[in-house]
Image (cartoon, rainbow, N blue to C red):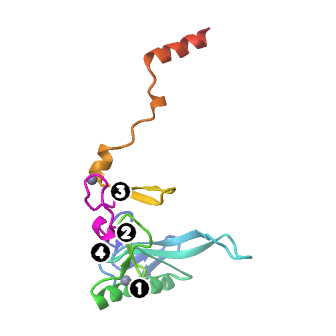
Amino acid sequence: MREIMTGRDIGNRINFCGHGTHSARYPWPDETVVSAGEGVVIRRDPKPGEPASYTTLFMEVYPPAATFIRSEGTTPQGCEDSAWSQYRLTLECADGSGSHDWETRGHRNGAGYCSRCGTFISQVFTGEQLGQFCRICGTGTTYHWDTDKVAGTTTFLCEEDYKAHKPARHPSHDRSLAQLLGELLDEDS
Ligand SMILES: [Zn+2]
Ligand SMILES: [Zn+2]
């Protein structure tokens, strides 16, 4: 495994900053990047009587061919158990069917979530697959879009056409020399 900050090869020795070093029990691929320690988690929606935040041990892993996995636990081994079962779920999902079952969940930027295992990856979908075509050149794109809430329509621009048709600077920023001189004279009087 590799340490997240330095990229250093740490074998199976995961440093749980301040909570000792944990020897990983499972055969994580060598290229897995890991970060672990103690952290504060802010609850987005605390239930009545529940504190707004809590402190927990955590482990974050970025295994090759899977996405970011985060686990929490009361012990380093608990963190690793949970992370490993999430990782297995991801691998078995992809192995079983040849691929994940991607859905957009409303994202237009090409990102996809697997409906079975929850894996999230950017750039799963192309503009063509999403039915998003540049309003100028007609190529499929996930680069830029504008939604007209009143009309309920969305239009798309590819990267090239977005850069060529960027909105112009607001006119009020472009003051003429005559205006500036006028303002200076006003201040003096
Ligand atoms: Zn999946
Ligand atoms: Zn275009």
* Residue at x 27% of width, y 86% of height: 98
Q: Nearer the viewer, mark 4 or mark 2?
A: 2
Q: Position of residue 58 (x, y in %)?
A: 51, 75
Judged from the image, the secondary structure of the residue bearing numbered disc 2 is: loop
Instruction: Report, in whole angstroms, how far the alpha carbon at label 4 lies from the one at label 2.
Output: 24 Å
Q: Position of residue 56 (x, y in %)?
A: 57, 75
Q: Position of residue 35 (x, y in %)?
A: 43, 71
Residue furthest bottom in the image: 96
Residue kind at label 2, given as amino acid type? Ala
**Mark 3 burial class by Cα count in 10 Å: few <14, some 14-19, many 20+:** many
Q: Earlier in the sequence, mark 4 or mark 3?
A: 4
Magenta residues (range): 122-144
* Residue at x 39% of width, y 63% of height: 5
Q: Quadrant of residue 95?
A: bottom left
Mark 4 sits on what residue? Answer: 31
Mark 2 sits on what residue? Answer: 111
Mark 1 sits on what residue? Answer: 116
